[in-house]
Amino acid sequence: MKFRVERDALADAVTWAARSLSARPTIPVLAGLLLTVTDDQLSVSGFDLEASTEVDLEVAAAAAGQALVSGRLLADITRALPPHPVDVMVDGSRLTISCGSARFTLPTMPVEDYPRLPTMPTTAGTVDSAEFATAVAQVAIAAGRDDTLPMLTGVRLEIEGDHLTLAATDRYRLAVRELTWNPGDPSAEPAQVLVPARTLADAAKSLSNSESMTIALSSAGGTAEGIIGFSGSTHGRASRTTTRLLDATFPAYRSLLPTEWASTAEVVVAPLVEAVKRVALVADRNAPVRLEFADGSVALSAGGEDEGRAEEQLEVGYEGDPITTAFNPQFLLDGLGALSSGSARLLFTSSNKPVVLRPDASGAGSGDYTYLIMPVRLPG
Amino acid sequence: MGRSADIPRSAGDFDGDDAGCTLLHVDMDAFYASVEIRRRPELRGKPVVVGGSLRGVVAAASYEARRYGIRSAMSMGQALRLCPRLIVLPPDRAAYSAASAAVMAILRDVTPLVEPLSLDEAFLDVAGAVRLHGRPAAIAAGIRARVSEELALTCSVGVAPTKFVAKLASARCKPDGMLVIPAAEVLNFLNPLPVTVLWGVGARTAELLHRLGIRTVADLADTPLDTLRRAVGVAGAEQLHALAHGLDPRTVQPGEVEKSISADHTNPVDLTTEADVRRELLRLAEEVARRVRERGWVARTIGIKIRFADFRTITRVRTLPGWTDSTSTIYETATELYAGLGLDQPRIRLAGVKCENFRVAGEAPEQLTLDTLGAEDPGSSRPAADQVIDAARARFGTAAMGYGTLLPTALPTALPTTGQNDRATGD
């Protein structure tokens, strides 16, 4: 194997592919990135048995072949290379990288021991990559981080016609985002899968600069069952990533979304975020922040006799009977931050019922987003 | 400084032999409720409970309220059904802490050897205080008098040669009483009691003992130690045998109110299967949860301890988003922590479950979850089972009711074991 490649193209490709590598791989070869040269194309791939990444780029190839080298070392080296063309070649069990006057020699690992990457499932459709990345980020924030409850660590992805719905919950909040996409077959059967939230957010973010993004899903019983794939291309670089789906049942969340409201508050997001952060300073970790909405204002408070107390008053658009509710401040801040709009609506039914946050109806590009928070029931 | 003038008639009446009865168990009567009634005298004689809102639980009930069958940890809804004119007061932790500090200060005037068990309960070792303050019965009477005069609260005091007999004694003279169990009377006092009063006899041990025909402490005391060893293991047998003979080597450990409540158990045979470990964790979670509820507390940090056959020991803790006193929440958290260890074919010698990070029940904010949506009474459906079990056990003993999975595995299949399908086939 021998090729010459642009320094930046190589660094970008290696960095992207190295994302999927596990810090502590279960078998040593999984710490490697596989370099494959065929014709004038280099593929860089990584795999941790859950998620795979693969990126193709144009190179000037002198000899085809494969090599497996430490992914972290390769990523560190390519990022640090000077701005010159890079020559890469395999010599026996060594990989040599030359760039300007710098020269690196890395040991290779046996290619035969490297597991086969999962095959990309069949294409289901395409979606605007930037919008998809935003949507995934808005939803993944509500996913659970506790691996002992796997069904809550995923993002539910539902496709039906040209509707794509993402949802996640950790039992304390629920985020749902709907967007439109371009299904390959508009009359395809609706499908619902559960994708690990962290991997999905990572994949969506890393492909967010693509011209467009392809979502690949296998039909039940197909060759790549239990796998979802995402692909896109940027600057002539084709990137693919797959991840194993979670085999768990997602809660029936639609019935949890209230449909009627007792009252509504219209708030400007930034000052509310600032106020919540300030009053939360006196609260113990995860101790609640109280919000009392009355005509035209909200009074925020936190803490008590023992730990100190904070209060702040904000003007908001509020109509209806006064309502007092309390939240884990982080849950509230997560939701306000995910709205990506300057103002928001809070929809209430009663103190101990979920509160729904929505971006203001006039907010541009905010799409159809719902963030539901379960309140904290106050004593007494 | 003599305190003889303080000794009320009840102590004067006690002319038995209290020599050697140097352990006192002081237990405040309906503590939170009494503190509330003290500052609102118009509530005296009325059924009063302290606790959360309509959906909260009873943290403490006055004796008038208890006459309606109201108990600590009962849901407020149930309490109000039992007594519609019940007076419900919100908890005031600061007031109870202050009152508790005043009580403990009185106790520490007697001896520095005070071991608080909770805000309203403590053991005292008065062996060294006898020369200064008189005989144990007089000390107990003096404490009751000072608590009554200085704090306008009542307490009950058990006086006995050992901790566990003192605690049994205080429970039997409530409210506003004292009971001395002279050393010579300990066995007469213990003998007719059911074995479940003994420290360490839970549902499982009780069932094992019942199958040997051992129902009372006297039965247990008469059982040869070898027979007991075969039934409940070496360590358990020796402890039970000693307690049944009135022997309890535990000494008073002076300190602050407990920061954690834990239970652990060394298994006679190493646990090797997932099902056995889960059953053990359930048993321990149940024990810990019961003790948390007994104190009227809720906990937010749950931990497990696992000791392997090679004595390597690991612990894991998790802090929940909200407080709990529910057996099932504590159990689920414990099993999740255990599952998180990802053990492969472990040999487990000891398992333990711990709760810490306490608050007074009804005073803690509760993070609601989506799971509770749609439930008629959000958040209290599981604790309801705990309350039923606690109530049944308070009346009929520890073996009266419990989790089916904790029944002894050697149950004959002929016994009606409804709902124990996995169990019955395993025999």
Image (spheres, rainbow, N blue to C red):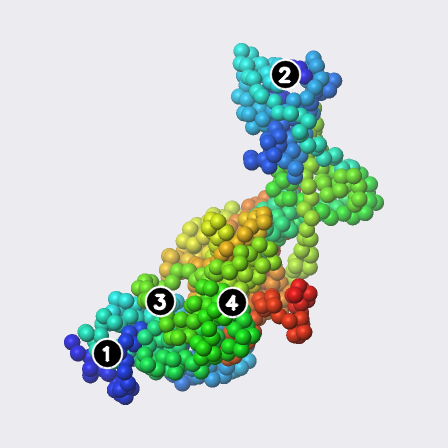
- Name the residue tied to disc 3: B250
Using the numbered discs, state the Cα–Cα distance from disc 4 to disc 2 in whole angstroms: 69 Å
- Helix, strand or loop at label 3? It is loop
Q: Is residue B188 visible?
A: yes
Identify the element where label 1 is drawn.
loop
Residue type indicated by callout 3: Arg
For the residues marked 1 and 4, what is the alpha-carbon distance in whole angstroms? 42 Å
Q: Are marks 3 and 1 on the same chain?
A: yes
Total number of numbered labels?
Answer: 4
Q: Which residue is mark 1?
A: B135
Host chain of mark 1: B
User: Label 2 sits on what residue type?
Assistant: Gly
Q: CA distance from mark 3 to mark 1?
A: 21 Å
Residue linked to disc 4? B230
Of the two numbered discs 4 and 2 in the rendering, the one whose residue sits closer to the viewer: 4
Q: Earlier in the sequence, mark 4 or mark 3?
A: 4
Q: Are marks 2 and 1 on the same chain?
A: no
Q: Nearer the viewer, residue A314 or B200?
A: B200
